[in-house]
Image (tube, helix red, strand yellow):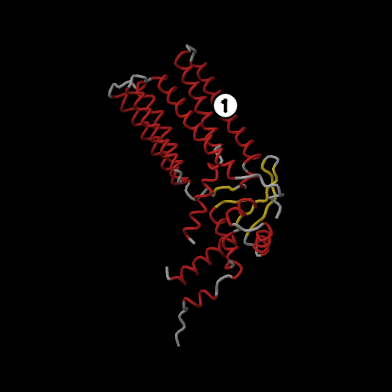
Amino acid sequence: MENNIKASHTRAMQYWFADGLMELSSAAICLVLGIYFMIMQIASASQAGFAVLFLLVFVAAYGIRKVMMWYRERSTYPRTGYVEIRKEREDRRFLVIAIGFSVLLLGFMVFTLMRGIQTMTWLPVIGGVIYGFIFALTGYRTKLVRFYFLAGFCLVLSIFLALSGLGDFWGTALLSFCIGMVLLAFGIVTRMNYIKHTRISVEQNNEP
Amino acid sequence: MNHEIQPTQTLVGVDRLIHEPSRSAILAVLSAVQCADFLYLQRETGLTKGNLTVHLSKLEAAGYIKIEKTYRGKLPLTLCSLTEEGKVAFENYRQQLRQFLGE
């Protein structure tokens, strides 16, 4: 029974990734971030201009999330139902991991600056570590192997970009675009699979 | 005379409302999540709509689960969640089973 309860919890976590919408919306956010880094590289705006642009990225991410939720309400809930994950179970542990990771990243940046290494050259690696961390954590929580693959892909690609001289914002933009495209591919495959194996319940499914 | 509680006596004393397979399956799913709707429970437990309705009603009547009619956007949802009483009862049931199985 204990294993069944753990399996139920894992399935509830996986539920939010079963319809592919999470990947598709994350892909859109990555593409927006890619555009943002590209503008950072080519445009010569003031700091205030970049701050406004950064704010716009947040607004776009919020909008993408809203659209995803809107679509999910109409497409996913009538097919496979709705479940809310219990929050208190692992939240504290993940908060500790997130704080530890932030300290590590900060330490890396201070280290590179102190050693005279240009942090901008390694910007794609920092981006890759952040993306990789998010995907690895998602993979750990959901037990979905594709997120571990994504985490590895982010790290390898970011190191390759930094070593090949594509540092700075160009590399980070390219990294975001590539991750966005991979997420898009994953999202489309997952979505097609989900649609194929589920159907909208024609009954009043929520009226016991 | 030995007054020590035997494992078999533990099993006899389990909550029969929970011990029914369908209802223990429902409680097992709900114990792992914050709340779930009717369709999700139906998919997870494999019960028919009628069966699930009956078992949910019994669990609600016993005060083990709470059934709440709500909305997510414009979609009506019937959300089920364990009550505190339900959590305690299910935890006791699990302990009794573990005791019986000698785990």
Say which residue appears at 46% left-offset and 44% top-offset.
A144
- At 44% from the left and 43% from the top, the residue drawn is A94
- Mark 1 Cα within 10 Å, few/some/many (few <14, many 20+)? some
Mark 1 — on which chain does it sit? A
Q: Nearer the viewer, residue A115 or A123?
A: A123
* Residue A176 sits above or below residue A142 on the image: above
Give the left or right position of residue B2, taking residue A117 as reference: right
Residue A138 spot, x, y in % from top left: 46, 41
Say which quadrant the C terminus of chain A sits in. bottom right
Q: Residue at x 57, y 51 (%)?
A: B34
Q: Secondary structure at mark 1?
A: helix
Residue placed furthest toward the bottom: B1
**Could you say which is closer to the camera, residue A75 or residue A85?**
A75
Give how far across and how far down residue B93 sits, in percent: 53, 67
So how many labels did they put on this image? 1
Q: Amino acid at mark 1?
A: Ala
Residue matched to label 1:
A60
In the current view of this chain or complex, which residue is farthest to the left?
A: A115
The picture places residue A121, in percent across and down from the top left corner, at 35, 21
- A123 is higher (above) or lower (below) than B56: above
Can you give x and y, in whole percent of width and height, for residue B20 in the image? Answer: 59, 67
Farthest front residue?
A196
Q: Residue at x 45, y 80 (%)?
A: B4
Residue B29 lies in quadrant? bottom right
Quarter location, residue A110: top left
